[in-house]
Image (tube, helix red, strand yellow):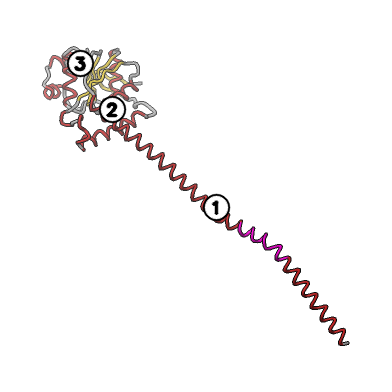
Amino acid sequence: MRVSSAAARIWYDGAMTSRSQERTAEETRAAPAAERRAEERRVFERRAPGGARRAVLRLVAAVTAAAAVVVAVFLGGFVVFAVAVSIADVPATPQADGIVALTGGRDRVAEAIDLLAAGRGRRLLISGVHPQTRAIDIEKQTESGHDVFACCVDLGRTALTTAGNAAEAADWVRTHGFSSLIVVTSAYHMPRSLIELERALPGVAKVPYPIARADLNLETWFLHPQTAKLLFREYVKYIVARFALSGPPKAATVVAGVGVGEGRRAILP
């Protein structure tokens, strides 16, 4: 009986040892696979956030570079615009069927009247005249003769913007059957004026006659903050006009003949 107990004990210890060895072997076989899975999970966790961050950084860099290019082009365009305005000069012998002066300064109107008196055009339209301004008032301000006004000057009284000036001038040009036009306005205003006039009158030749006020110091605009600010504002307006999708709105235009006691009302279709 004692021998059987000892034999049973030996058998039990052997069975437990064998089972333990089997478990150890299984764990040994499973450990590399588990470690591989854990390592793969750690690598994925490290790479995923890093990849997202890199993608975001690449996007930010691309947007910043594009914005820098746009700003550089915009500012470069402004410099070109300002230089072009500063070196603009009047033609020596301008000649056209008609002359249009866009109001906004005494010098513009006075120069246009001088051109008319010199026979550079057959008629003159002063566009954008205030409704309460009389022809006699313009005569006094420009120190021009009444005969010139009585003969060949028309006042446009409805234009409030440059696009409105273009619409007013277009109606006037068509009324008289003109095919060419001398455009008188400030030098900084000329580029935008020509865009609007070309949109309203694509088949009419335009002769720019830019007026440069001495007090603006256009030739050294970069030394005068107020002039630079004026040019920058006009440059922004020029860009807007340049890329506008549609022409100026069409509306009734009143053009009054001066000195002959008659007026003409033309409704643009």
Task: Answer whether residue 30 is magenta in the image.
Answer: yes
Q: Main secondary structure of the magenta part?
A: helix
Question: Measuring 34% from the left and 16% from the top, which residue is drawn there?
Answer: 203
* Residue 91 placement (x, y as % from top left): 22, 17
Corner quadrant of residue 247: top left
Magenta span: 26-39
Q: Circle 2 sits in a helix, a strand or a loop, which is it?
A: helix
Q: Earlier in the sequence, mark 2 or mark 3?
A: 3
Corner quadrant of residue 42: bottom right
Q: Which residue is mark 2?
A: 162
Q: Which residue is mark 1?
A: 48
For badge 2, the amino acid type reads: Thr
Q: Earlier in the sequence, mark 1 or mark 2?
A: 1
Task: Answer whether residue 97 is magenta in the image.
Answer: no
Q: Earlier in the sequence, mark 3 or mark 1?
A: 1
Quarter of the image with the N terminus in it: bottom right
Question: Measuring 70% from the left and 66% from the top, which residue is drawn there?
Answer: 27
Q: Circle 1 sits in a helix, a strand or a loop, which is it?
A: helix
Which numbered marker is on residue 92? 3
As drawn, the residue found furthest toward the bottom would be 2
* Residue 98 placement (x, y as % from top left): 24, 15
In the image, is residue 9 above or below residue 85? below
* Residue 255 placement (x, y as % from top left): 24, 20
| Eye-nearest disc, 2 or 3 | 3
Total labels: the figure holds: 3
- Alpha carbon distance from label 1 to label 2: 57 Å
For badge 3, the amino acid type reads: Ala
For badge 1, the amino acid type reads: Ala
- Alpha carbon distance from label 3 to label 1: 71 Å
